[in-house]
Image (spheres, rainbow, N blue to C red):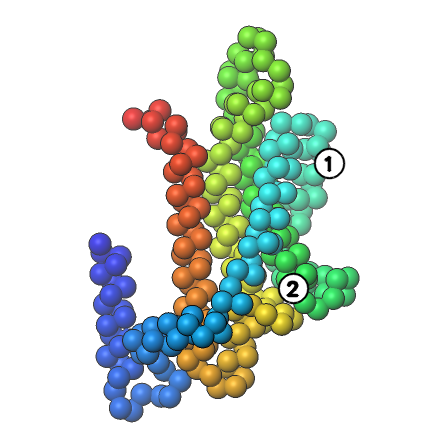
Amino acid sequence: MIGWGLLAAVLGLWQLVATRPEHPEFVLSPVEIAVHFAAALRSGELLPHVGASLPGFVLGSAIGVILGLLAGVARSLDQMLSPVVFLTYPVPKIVFLPIVMLWIGIGDASKIVIIALACFYPCFVNAYYGARSTPRIMVWASLNMGARRSQVFGKIVVPSALPLVFAGLRVSLALSFILLFSTEMINARSGLGFLIRQAESSLRFDLMYVSIVAVAALGYASDQLLLLARRRVLAWQAATTR
């Protein structure tokens, strides 16, 4: 309630400042932005640019989680992948955009590759450490009772790693929206970042604010859906900690 109250206070102050007669033309009030947002949805001007980060997020996160889990339990794969991943992890992934553009070309494909690359690392690292943090006593007990290694991986290692996996997914989701905006401002022909750049160059301040609100709304909604999935998948964890 405190958070929502603070948000309401900020919006109220913004509305008060934006309705003063001497306010700049490029400062729109929250009410005006809401009206323009509804109009953009009705006209269909906004919808074609929504959802561009999803393919990159899904691709990079899926590969990162799978390889991270496998590297956490297979020593040979760990020795092959971990040095490369942890060496390149600190490098900002946006610096690879010129190289990717040369290889793939300017367009949505290079944007998806950069987003996937950025999402891969936090998912790999979290899945890797989640798999390695599996209690060894549970693994040994399962093997002694006749469980196959595939069963141990699916029923012990993966559930044990899931809390860290979801933490990595949330980080990747935030990164996907950050990279989405950055790449679309540079080389894309569609997307909300492209729409913001186009609106700024044509002095369409209403469309610029609408696009920014759309990015915030999509990011918040995606994060809440991920948290909902986490609560559903990890319901057993909440039950065991009571």
Q: Is residue 234 left or right of residue 132?
A: left
Q: Residue at x 36, y 88 (%)?
A: 24
User: Type of residue at label 2?
Assistant: Asp
Of callouts 2 and 1, the N-terminal one: 1
The kind of secondary structure element at disc 1 is helix
Q: Residue at x 67, y 38 (%)?
A: 82
User: Type of residue at label 1?
Assistant: Met
Quick one: label 1, few (<14), some, or many (20+) residues within 10 Å? few
Residue 20 image position (x, y, % from top left): 25, 87
- Residue 80 - label: 1
Residue named by callout 2: 108
- Residue 29 vertical position relative to residue 169 in the rendered view, above or below: below
- Residue 175 vertical position relative to residue 163 in the rendered view, above or below: below
Q: Residue at x 29, y 26 (%)?
A: 242
What is the tally of numbered marks visible in this picture? 2
Residue that sits furthest to the bottom in the current view: 22
The kind of secondary structure element at disc 2 is helix
Query: Which quarter of the rendering shows the N terminus?
Result: bottom left
- Residue 5 - label: none
